[in-house]
Amino acid sequence: MTIAPEIIGYLAATLTTASFVPQAILTIKTKDTESLSLGMYSTFTLGVLCWLIYGIYLDDKAIIFANAITLLLAASILFFKIYNVVYKKKA
């Protein structure tokens, strides 16, 4: 029995995208980003954007699907992190 590469791609896309849902929900709910790295989330969000562009270029639905959703989740976390860095500086 062989598993189609597309099924593996969609499974990978679903698992990696789903891994961001708890962090995004927690961040949106609490708005607490103190323990999150601005550099990591900035770099990660840019990387996900590049993967999305790559998926669009290849017309690969699994890559597009996963990275479009992950971009929304990562960008929302990054937004709150930047907001907290800019507007909630500790004295």
Image (tube, rainbow, N blue to C red):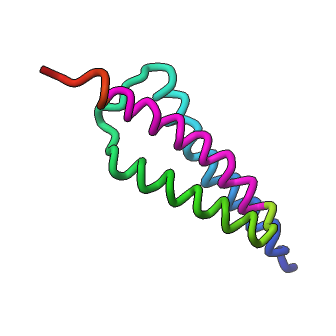
- Residue 69 falls inside the magenta stretch: yes
Quarter of the image where one finds residue 12? bottom right
Q: Nearer the viewer, residue 56 or 69?
A: 56
Q: Is residue 42 left or right of residue 71?
A: left
Q: Main secondary structure of the magenta part?
A: helix
Q: Nearer the viewer, residue 71 or 19?
A: 71
| Residue at the image point whose x is 17% and y is 22% from the top | 90
| Residue at the image point whose x is 65% and y is 54% from the top | 67
Q: Please tell me whether residue 86 is drawn above or below residue 11 in the rendered image.
A: above
Report the magenta residues as a range.
62-84
The x and y percentages for residue 17 are: 63, 49
Of the 4 image quadrants, the one containing the N terminus is bottom right
Q: Please tell me whether residue 69 is drawn above or below residue 7 in the rendered image.
A: above
Q: Is residue 60 left or right of residue 44?
A: right
The x and y percentages for residue 33 are: 36, 31
Of the 4 image quadrants, the one containing the C terminus is top left
Residue at far left of view: 91
Q: Is residue 75 left or right of residue 34?
A: right
